[in-house]
Image: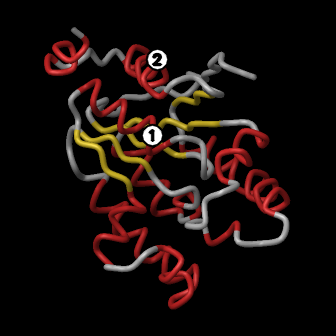
């Protein structure tokens, strides 16, 4: 079980640490870690997939069934454009958000992009029972996840300013590492809740 973090800091980042965008494959913990990070630093947490569902009034499998992946990606692009313009935000993006060049440009130029990574085995463990992931409703989810990793990893790496891999570390500890790495202090409310 891997609990250590690995990071790359080889991309200069002049972007505002008041806007933090989480990218990475499904099941990596973008929403869970994002919520913990937002609570720690006092930012607003948003999830692009949840925002799509809220705006559309339908769940993601329904959108995929009715509009196909292309329709979903169009909706996602509008949400990413809108949310990356918010301030003091932690934004968890869907696993495929990096597929559109526009999304990658907005994410990279408007804030600090964190690539959350995880092993294939851990990703499979985390997503195995989730029926709300249309791309995994197949006889061989492992093969799908492997193919998605191969196709999308270069995009995650290209858009990201930093990369972290946390394994089974707690969301709170993971959030603390990210915040410390970016030099963002705990918000006063978060300090009060620690006591």
Which residue bears the numbered disc 1?
32
Q: Residue at x 65, y 57 (%)?
A: 129
Q: Secondary structure at mark 1?
A: helix
Q: Position of residue 41 (x, y in %)?
A: 26, 25
Q: Secondary structure at mark 2?
A: helix
Does residue 134 appear left or right of residue 89 in this picture? right
Q: Farthest bottom residue?
A: 66
Q: Residue at x 58, y 27 (%)?
A: 164
Q: CA distance from mark 1 to mark 2?
A: 14 Å
Q: Nearer the viewer, residue 92 or 74?
A: 92
Q: Position of residue 8 (x, y in %)?
A: 61, 23
Q: Residue at x 40, y 38 (%)?
A: 34
Q: Farthest front residue?
A: 129
The tag earlier along the polypeptide, 1 or 2, is 1
Q: Position of residue 126 (x, y in %)?
A: 65, 46
Instruction: Name the colour scheme.
Output: secondary structure
Q: Is residue 47 above or below residue 44?
A: below
Residue 177's disc number: 2
Q: Residue at x 70, y 55 (%)?
A: 128
Q: Is residue 48 above or below residue 69?
A: above
Q: Nearer the viewer, residue 104 or 95?
A: 95
């Amino acid at each position: 079980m891997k609990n250590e973090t690995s990071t790359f800091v080889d991309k200069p980042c002049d972007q505002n640490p008041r806007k933090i965008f989480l990218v990475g494959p499904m099941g990596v913990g973008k929403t869970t870690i994002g919520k913990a990070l937002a609570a720690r630093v006092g930012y607003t947490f948003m999830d692009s997939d949840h925002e799509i569902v809220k705006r559309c009034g339908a769940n993601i499998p329904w959108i995929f069934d009715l509009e196909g992946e292309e329709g979903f990606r169009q909706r996602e692009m509008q949400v990413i454009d809108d949310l990356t313009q918010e301030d003091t935000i932690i934004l968890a993006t869907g696993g495929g958000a990096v597929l559109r060049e526009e999304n990658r440009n907005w994410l990279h130029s408007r804030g600090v992009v964190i690539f959350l990574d995880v092993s294939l085995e851990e990703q499979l463990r985390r997503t195995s029972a989730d029926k709300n992931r249309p791309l995994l409703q197949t006889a061989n989810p492992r093969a799908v996840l492997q193919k998605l990793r191969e196709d999308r990893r270069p995009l995650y790496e290209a858009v990201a300013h930093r990369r972290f891999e946390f394994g089974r570390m707690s969301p709170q500890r993971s959030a603390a590492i990210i915040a410390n790495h970016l030099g963002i202090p705990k918000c006063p409310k978060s300090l009060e809740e620690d006591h």
